[in-house]
Image: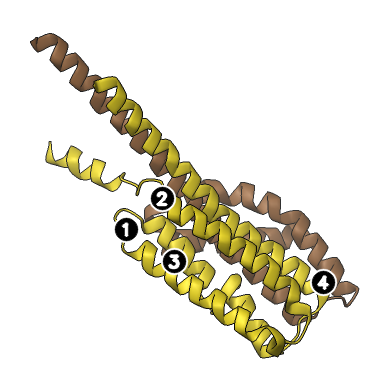
Chain colours: A yellow, B brown
Amino acid sequence: MSIFLVSCEGLRTAAFDQYSYQKATEIKVEAANLLDSAVYPYAEHEQKVEKLREDLQKIIEYEKNKSYNDISLAMWQILSDEEKNLLAGLLKRWENQQQLSPAFVQESKAQVMEAINLIIKYEAAKDKTSKAQLQKLINTY
Amino acid sequence: MDFEELLKEMRNSLLLLVREQYADFSKAGEDTVTQFLEDAREKLRKWTFLLAEELITPAEYEWLLKSQKDLFLMHTLYSAGISKIRLGIFKNKVINTITDVAIKALL
């Protein structure tokens, strides 16, 4: 019995979270608009970059404090890691280079958008778990 | 550039990465590798063309290749998460079935 309970524990996933879903879509739009500007000097957009970095820090803190949320947290951490080559890494490159080429911005932005879409899709998929639990509750009572 | 050789190298590198860093998700990760590289094929072709046309620099080309590796990690985590959700739903159904059968037998 205890082995069964332990294995069930490992399968638990945080329930769908409307706030997480909304913040992820907001960050996607914010990032998409900002990255279009990466063909211009970084200094002109520094404040917006800092705002996006803050938003990333906030969502990571929020996700960190949810139980059974290891996968969503790991995805946000990869996206926000300046040493990796996704959103935070691209912002860092813009800051270091001061201005990026149009072709590079177009390709790198597509990579970042694909990564954020995965986070959004995963959060949306959690809804099915919540729905299944709700259905069970309705069927029971 | 030999695309097949590049894809082969990337496949080996990604499989190693999954086994070393994401052992818990290695099954889902390994299943994702083939599909992911198939999807990456056109990107690699495009980036190589941009490099040849000097529209991106070698450093930018390298940055994009590394971003593909990081994106792969995201895909692996996503696949693992979806598998976990499906197994969780299955687990709930198993528990419900056992409960139903037990209640019917006892009452």
Q: As shown in the figure, which amino acid type bears the numbered disc 2?
A: Asp
Q: As shown in the figure, which amino acid type bears the numbered disc 3?
A: Ile
Q: In this rendered view, identify the residue nearer to me: B10 or A81.
A: A81
Question: Which residue: 25% across, 41% down?
Answer: A8
Helix, strand or loop under label 2: loop
- Identify residue for label 1: A66
Question: Which residue: 82% across, 68% down?
Answer: B48
**Does residue A101 appear in the picture of this structure?**
yes
- What is the spatial separation of the Cα atoms under label 3 and label 1, in whole angstroms? 11 Å
**Marks 1/4 same chain:** yes
Residue A12 sits above or below residue B103 on the image: below
Q: Is residue A16 left or right of residue A133?
A: right
> Sequence-wise, which precedes: disc 4 or disc 3?
3
* Quadrant of image for the C terminus of chain A: top left
> Sequence-wise, which precedes: disc 1 or disc 4?
1
Q: Position of residue A92 (x, y in %)?
A: 61, 83
* Quadrant of image for the N terminus of chain A: top left
> Sequence-wise, which precedes: disc 3 or disc 1?
3
**Marks 4/3 same chain:** yes
> Sequence-wise, which precedes: disc 3 or disc 2?
2
Tags 1 and 2 touching, CB below 8 Å? yes
Q: Residues within 10 Å of mark 1 (few under 14, many from 20)?
A: some
Q: Position of residue A120 (x, y in %)?
A: 54, 52
> Sequence-wise, which precedes: disc 1 or disc 2?
2
